[in-house]
Image (tube, rainbow, N blue to C red):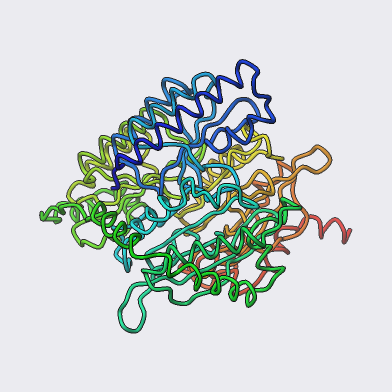
Amino acid sequence: MYSYSDFDEAFVRSRVAQFANQIERRLDGSLTEDEFRPLRLMNGLYLQLHAYMLRVAIPYGTISPHQMRQLATIADTWDKGYGHFTTRQNIQFNWPKLPEVPAILAALADVEMHAIQTSGNCVRNVTADHFAGAAADEIADPRPYAELLRQWSTDHPEFQFLPRKFKIAITGAPNDRAVTAAHDIGLRIVRNAAGETGFQVLVGGGLGRTPMVAMVVRDFLPEADLLPYVEAVLSVYNSFGRRDNKFKARIKITLHETGKDEITRLVEAEFARLRPLFGGNDQALLAEIRAAFAPPAFRDAPVEAYDAFHKADPVFRAWADTNLTAHRNGQYAIVTVSLKAPGKTPGDATSDQMRLLADLAERYGHGDLRISHEQNVILPHVHKSDLPVLHAALVKAGLGTANVGLLSDIIACPGMDYCALATARSIPVAQELATHFEALKLEHEIGPLKIKISGCINACGHHHVGHIGILGLDRAGVENYQITLGGDGTEDAVIGEKTGPGFAYDEIVPAIERILRAYLGLRQEASETFLQAFKRVGMEPFKAALYASEAAQDAA
């Protein structure tokens, strides 16, 4: 992974010192909360429902065992012994005390981490495919490009005060695991007819109160043009994005109001102006960065023992069937460690679990860990012969849940248990759904399913692109949950359709059960997934099942 240069180290340390001074001024009353707010947000510090929350960047989801152990130390020393991994491949600490934040930031700097630009109207943490550098279907590792974008965007003088926050995601595989179409800029690595590597560029995606799928503005952008083109997009947005209404300030609204053709023309004109200013230093830097992401020294060893264990042990086989993904090296597997044990908070990891994951990554995973936007932890390089003992260690620590890609592998934002913006609870809904369907023993029968839950219209839980999306709203002081169906966050991205009226808190789990029992009756064969069935039959059969009791009452 990338290691800080002397410049990086000095920059982060100076920001820690600067923010420590700002905190001192807030504590002694020299700064009011209104004056302090933009300063703390630029350093990832939020004021939540019950306490401050510190959001720490994990750039493109890549983290070392040493860094993971430091997160565990921070959780024990200055928080409540756990951290929450988010859909932005960040980690949040929910209980830091304001006077102690400088010490936390200094501890992060000790392991080449920070909280800069995890909030504010700037370019946020650049996210990427969590299987980068390992996936069998990968065209090229997207992380060097993500690191180039991170360095370019950090404290960029032109883009610190954009009309609104700005998010970039990049994937190196045709199977999009980074939800690129739901970002302000989505980058998909492709090859042209000549075999050259470049990018398909998408602009104007986003969820929230106005969900939109990004539009393709370039089918093929040469690799060398990446930074000037991204800068052109941001420059146009900075000039034309609305600042009169924060709800209409994202680039997706600019694109919608101005039109794709006109925005593309403006971007291409700005790109033509900027391109000559890039004399090749960015490509020299990219070459240096790429060297930091060389593949590990893969071990050549027999895998027959794994095959035998897989055949003989049904518990291990169930976990392998859901939590393992094909690796580019046939002797290896990509391991997804689920943070979604039924009844637990999605995305939470205790300090002990963090330390164990760090140990396992060092022992069996070439010292590499990833955080996925689906709030799980990845060991991207594990030799198959090590999988049985790895699995046993995970099970012992409560991390062996075999549910990746299934119903209980739910994405959920913190909701009203923590967030000051939330209008409903998310975590208890996720917990009750998981435990309910575990009791019914239907999860494996239902098969691949992505449920995503948001506790407010800001859609931090990505509910719009869930196969089943749940949005918690406030209706006259009462929690009300709206359901969407048919969303998809892959390369075939689509926004889910609303089913109709929402449901009270105690009605939402039975409502989801009605939908899924309808699916089991509608599917043509066991291999037809929920999303495939929905695309085939449409909304009406599910809507009829969902509102059957209301229809019966109306008829009576």
x 62%, y 41%: residue: 426
x 60%, y 48%: residue: 161
x 72%, y 50%: residue: 246
In-front residue for pair 83/222:
222
Q: Is residue 423 above or below residue 169?
A: above
Q: From this viewpoint, is residue 309 visible?
A: yes
When asked about the image quadrant of residue 553, the answer is: bottom right
Q: Position of residue 539 (x, y in %)?
A: 68, 68
| Image-based side of 203 in relation to 153, left or right | right
- Image quarter where the C terminus lies is bottom right
Q: Is residue 145 above or below residue 88?
A: below
x 55%, y 52%: residue: 158
Q: Is residue 109 above or below residue 228?
A: above
| Image-based side of 374 in relation to 457, left or right | left
When asked about the image quadrant of residue 182, the answer is: bottom right
Q: Position of residue 434 (x, y in %)?
A: 53, 44
Q: Position of residue 406 (x, y in %)?
A: 47, 53
| Image-based side of 271 in relation to 548, left or right | left
In-front residue for pair 276/493:
276
Q: Is residue 483 above or below residue 46?
A: below
Q: Position of residue 15 (x, y in %)?
A: 46, 33
